[in-house]
Image: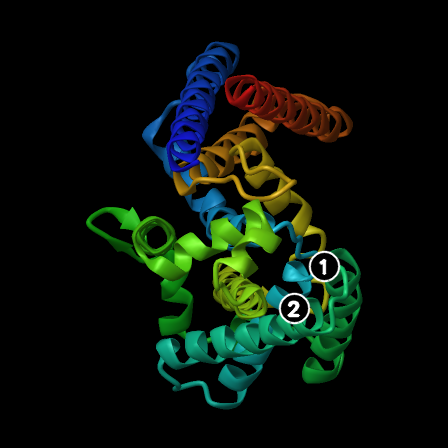
Amino acid sequence: MGERNNIAAIKKGITSNIREIGLVLVILIISVFVQLRSQGHFLTPENINNIFVETAVLAILSVGMMMVIITRGIDLSIGATMALSGMAGTTFLKSHIDTNPLIIILIAVAVGAICGVLIGFLVARLRIPPIIATLGMMNVYRGLTYLVSNGSWVLQKDMSVNFMAIATNRFLGINNLIWVAITIYVIAYIFLNYIKTGRKIYAVGNSPESAKVSGINNERILTLVYTIMGAIAGLAGILYVCKYAVAQGETASGYEMSVIAACVLGGVSISGGTGKVQGVLLGAILFGILNNAMPLIHISAFWQEAIRGLIILISVILNAVIQRNVQKKALQRRV
């Protein structure tokens, strides 16, 4: 049995590597095509930097969503969590303008983590389906955002120069947002691949029943995953507000769909148990390239949504076909 599991794991790894190589090729092909169509305006240092800066928040969120999807869950509340966290942090900043930006970030992360804990309680302890729990809490968090702000916006004039510098300053020539994304990905890679708790997330996603039998506390893992997602959404929320210099009730509305799309493009299986940090990063970059490239080559806004949807659908189909083939070969080997 152990040998069969090892063989299955090796095949799974090979399949994942093939998918990631395919993503790299797709990114290269699209980049060359757009470069030619845009008369050389796409692959310029300035535009490449813009792509990564614009994709940074999406990429950060995709790491948290990947963990949620690996456990066979979904989180539709992250846009609302971003709005609430960003509003809480900047509302405090508005009243205490000289506050250290790191404290504002910690406030936003704490608010996001609390939001995640509540969802984790609903999903793990009360056994409410993730899509229902997060959809309900999405509306709760949006409502709380309006209560915190009293229906008003926090504008650039209400934010300190030091706070705004988080999204505009550079270190070694690279925007701070990109450095934050890199840090999150390094931590996530180490956590999921080398830390025992991270490996348990995959175990719960692969088979909750087997995980429970082997001594894993499924409820604790699910609560942890949604708490991490909430904390990451809180961080992303304050970075999003800082980047666009405005906090309001509809901040990041619908953003969760883009995050889920980036995960799917990155090879995260919606049936759980499968997903790699490097794949999600490539998925986020691909999504960012599409968002940047389509306006550049003058594709209509109406067609842009259709093209994104088609690419996501094709990605889901390919993932399903690949997984089905892997499972079929595994069964044939057992027979």
Task: State left or right for residue 268 relative to residue 270.
Answer: left
Q: Give, as a three-letter code, the residue at label 1.
A: Pro
Query: Which of the 4 image quadrants contains residue 17?
Result: top left
Indicate the secondary structure of the residue bearing disc 2: helix
Counting other residues with Cα less than 10 Å from the Cα at mark 2, is it few (<14), some (14-19), or many (20 or more)?
many
Front-lying residue, 283 or 329 = 329
Q: Which residue is mark 1?
A: 130
> Going 65% across and 74% down the picture, which residue do you hit?
121
Query: Which of the 4 image quadrants contains residue 136?
Result: bottom right
> Going 55% across and 34% down the picture, which residue do you hit?
287
Tell me if residue 79 comes above or below residue 7 in the rendering.
below
Count the marks: how many? 2
Indicate the secondary structure of the residue bearing disc 1: helix
Q: Position of residue 226 (x, y in %)?
A: 57, 65
Front-lying residue, 67 or 30 = 67
First in residue order: circle 2 vs circle 1? 2
Q: Give, as a three-letter code, the residue at label 2.
A: Ala
The tag on residue 124 is 2
Task: State left or right for residue 300 relative to residue 268.
Answer: right
Front-lying residue, 59 or 163 = 59
